Amino acid sequence: PTSLLWFRRDLRLADHPALLAAVDAAGGQGDVLAVFVVDPALWRPAGAARRQFLRNCLAALQESLDGALVLRSGDPAVVLPALVSEVDADSVHVSADAGPYGRRRDTAVEEALGDVPLVRTGSPYAVTPGRVLKQDGEPFRVFSPFARAWRAHGWRAPAPRPEAVRWAAGLPSEDLPSAQDLGDVRLPPAGEAAAVAAWERFRDTLLSGYPETRNLPATDGTSRLSAYLKYGCLHPRTLLAELAADGETTEAVRRFTDELAWREFYADVVWHRPESVREPLDPQTGAIEYDTGPQADALFAAWAEGRTGYPIVDAGMRQLLGEAYVHNRVRMIVASFLVKDLHLDWRRGSRHFLQHLVDGDLASNNHGWQWVAGTGTDASPYYRVFNPTKQGRQFDPEGEYVRRWVPELRDVPTAYVHEPWLAPGGAPAGYPEPVVEHAAERKVALARYQQIRSE
Ligand code: FAD
């Protein structure tokens, strides 16, 4: 028998339960047909950086399968039944998708396949979203208790690599999607081997310092694994197993595990509340007033182009355009600035991020935004307004990050690098005055949040 392995966000061969299931289903004698479907519904909105990264991941997978990966483009509910009849496959194997579009698509594919089963084995998460519940059977709404329950639930050991896979060969494949025009943006190397190398480098050299360095955007202090995790070039369970291997839970291991848990938490929230990728999770906060109109549009453009006059915000937005990536601390700062200093809808910001981020992920991004906006998974965060100057001084004390991304500020003395308008003689020529005054806008934001709380 032939079984079909439909790759999606699992572009690797190690620790791949659906691959094992496909090999099993094919029996000792049968072939496994490896397929990736370029689905316009996901490809079109992805943005150039993510498309290019995905394309490069597919090229790497193609190579590790000695060319046996079959690429087809179109609606999977049309493409897959056609392939199944071309090779007379008995089953189609996938890693389960927990996102709203993926779940709808898989139901449609399942129906279109008729008698041929769509078999879901594993998922892109250590614990399949939906499995960690409160004692009363309800889903978690707050991170810390979720993380505790998630750890207590535990996860399987990594799946072993199948000994030999007989990949079905000879079927016509489309070419890789064409290369995207990225301008000057340089992406990290793609694919499973690059992901493993990035992980090993982090594990061996950076992890021990992670609790101290993870918040410093000028420092190479985090794993930079997010895009690899997004496309499944490696599985979080592989990382968790290695972290647990020496039996000692250091502060660094605990911190890093917590970050992986945030990713699992947001996927879990979206599994239970798929509409929360678009709507505020907390319906009361749907009433918050956001600014619109030409003035709001001009402020949005200043934010998106990195010319707000607040150095750490501008550095972050320029990092996004330059690297298709932003440091986590700075994601929080720029997001807070958009929502609480410029009073713009978090959805405008989250769309912009998804357009540009190489790790853009609906659950992590939109809930990251909601966390900052105070509309999401937290109890009473409306008073949490980041002060961009203080954040800059605290997390980029020498102004190294700011100077890297905002060359106009290169010669500003460190004492003023986060408030160049206070420098003797003012901000350097070519660098904008602050577009708003933080202290005043903070009050406006708090008043708007108080308003909905008292309604
Ligand atoms: P590390 O610090 O090395 O963390 C390891 C891994 O843990 C990350 O690769 C990621 O998979 C996960 N992780 C870490 N922090 C978070 C978090 N807060 N939420 C969810 N997962 C986390 N992450 C994305 O993967 N895609 C996004 O689209 C995304 N958008 C974000 C938007 C906003 C407004 C904010 C505040 C955060 C967003 N994050 C997103 C989370 C976080 O910023 C990135 O995962 C992290 O910066 C990636 O760098 P790293 O791999 O070096 O992280």
Image (cartoon, grey):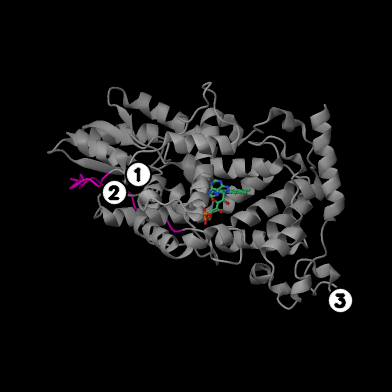
Task: Label 1: state its secondary structure.
Answer: strand
Q: Taking 394 as reference, is 203 left or right?
A: left
Q: Main secondary structure of the magenta part?
A: loop
Location of residue 439 in the rendering, given as x and y in whole percent from the top left corner:
85, 53
**Mark 3 or mark 1: whose residue is earlier in sequence:** 1
Q: Where residue 233 sits in the image (x, y, percent)?
A: 39, 51
CA–CA distance in space, label 1 to label 2: 7 Å
Which residue is denoted by mark 3 in the rendering?
424
Residue in the image at 83% along x and 64% along y: 433
Residue at image coords 46%, 56% = 52
Distance from disc 3 to disc 1, alpha carbons, whole Å, reads: 59 Å
Q: Residue tagged by mark 2?
A: 69
Q: Is residue 154 visible?
A: yes
Horizontally, is 171 left or right of 413 in the view?
Answer: left
* Residue type marked 3: Pro
Q: Which residues are magenta?
A: 160-179
**Does residue 267 show up?**
no
